[in-house]
Image (cartoon, rainbow, N blue to C red):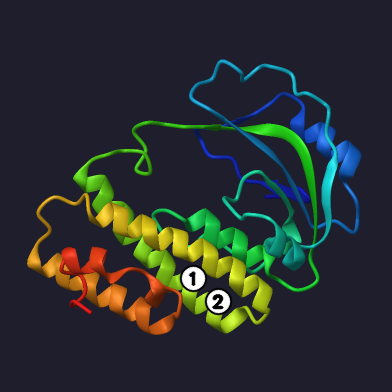
């Protein structure tokens, strides 16, 4: 990339016409490292050429670490990011899902970074029924379970080593607990898991339990029924 600003766009998604030119003409400032703008959910491409509604307002301007304490962190889009912010950060290729979430946490939690959040909804996220995150098959549930466990293992290590602020840790812990419940929901839908697979899930989940206090608060009855953990 040769430009000053970077934007990641999934191949299935699109931007409203003139979104980037409008944002950068109005908000490109030397003291801003990241610009976060709004997203629309859609199931098709009927709106790809609809002009953007220019009714934006500034919702937040300040430290990226303060931003993490206030707002829900989701995916790497729609963030406009100055290239220097990502000088030492890349997508983790070991992650099949949640790679964008891990990526966002890593660049937002750097020191001395400033973010501007605006209400302008110029990004269109197209929901694809056949994507691995939406499919309702045993194979998809198995992939999501393994991918989410890998994300949790990486995120917990990152949190323990690099995140010292109690408020940020609390936000990350809340997000992680939601992901853990999602893991349990996917596990319950896997058809006929093998003994080896059950053993691997049990080992990985027990390891996560040892590392974190909030996982221990989860109801073990769901896990016990899946033979993933011994009964309490």
In the rendered image, which quarter is residue 194 located in? bottom left
Residue at (84%, 40%) from the top-left corner? 24
Q: Is residue 167 left or right of residue 29?
A: left
User: Circle 1: is it few (<14), some (14-19), or many (20+) Cα within 10 Å?
Assistant: some
In the rendered image, which quarter is residue 26 located in? top right
User: Circle 2: is it few (<14), some (14-19), or many (20+) Cα within 10 Å?
Assistant: some
In the rendered image, which quarter is residue 134 located in? top left
Residue at (69%, 64%) from the top-left corner? 69
**Considering depth in this image, is 203 or 5 the residue closer to the camera?**
203
Position in image of residue 55 (x %, y %): 83, 28
Q: Is residue 138 visible?
A: yes
Q: Is residue 7 left or right of residue 191?
A: right
Position in image of residue 9 (x %, y %): 59, 40
Residue at (36%, 78%) from the top-left corner? 209
Q: Is residue 199 left or right of residue 154?
A: left
In the displayed structure, would residue 157 be above or below residue 113?
Answer: below
SS for callout 2: helix
Quadrant showing the C terminus: bottom left
User: Is there CB contact under 8 Å for labels 1 and 2?
Assistant: yes
Badge number at residue 181: none
Residue designated by label 2: 159
**Considering depth in this image, is 131 or 92 the residue closer to the camera?**
131
Q: Is residue 93 visible?
A: no
Q: Is residue 19 left or right of residue 86?
A: right
Residue designated by label 1: 155
């Amino acid at each position: 990339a040769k430009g000053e600003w970077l934007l990641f766009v999934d191949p299935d998604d699109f931007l409203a016409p003139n979104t980037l030119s409008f944002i950068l003409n109005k908000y490109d400032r030397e003291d801003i490292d990241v610009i976060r703008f709004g997203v629309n959910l859609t199931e098709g491409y009927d709106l790809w050429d609809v002009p953007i509604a220019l009714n934006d307002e500034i919702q937040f301007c300040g430290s990226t670490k303060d931003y993490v304490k206030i707002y829900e962190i989701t995916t790497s889009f729609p963030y406009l990011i100055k290239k220097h912010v990502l000088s030492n950060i890349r997508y983790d290729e070991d992650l099949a899902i949640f790679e964008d979430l891990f990526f966002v946490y890593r660049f937002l939690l750097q020191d001395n970074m400033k973010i501007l959040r605006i209400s302008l909804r110029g990004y269109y996220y197209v929901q694809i029924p056949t994507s691995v995150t939406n499919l309702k098959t045993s194979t998809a549930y198995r992939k999501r379970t393994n991918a989410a466990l890998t994300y949790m293992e990486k995120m917990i290590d990152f949190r323990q080593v690099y995140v010292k602020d109690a408020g940020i840790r609390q936000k990350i812990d809340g997000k992680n607990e939601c992901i853990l419940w999602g893991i349990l929901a996917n596990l319950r839908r896997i058809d006929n898991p093998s003994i080896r697979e059950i053993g691997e899930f049990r080992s990985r989940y027990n390891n996560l339990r040892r590392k974190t206090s909030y996982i221990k608060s989860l109801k073990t009855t769901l896990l016990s029924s899946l033979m993933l953990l011994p009964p309490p």
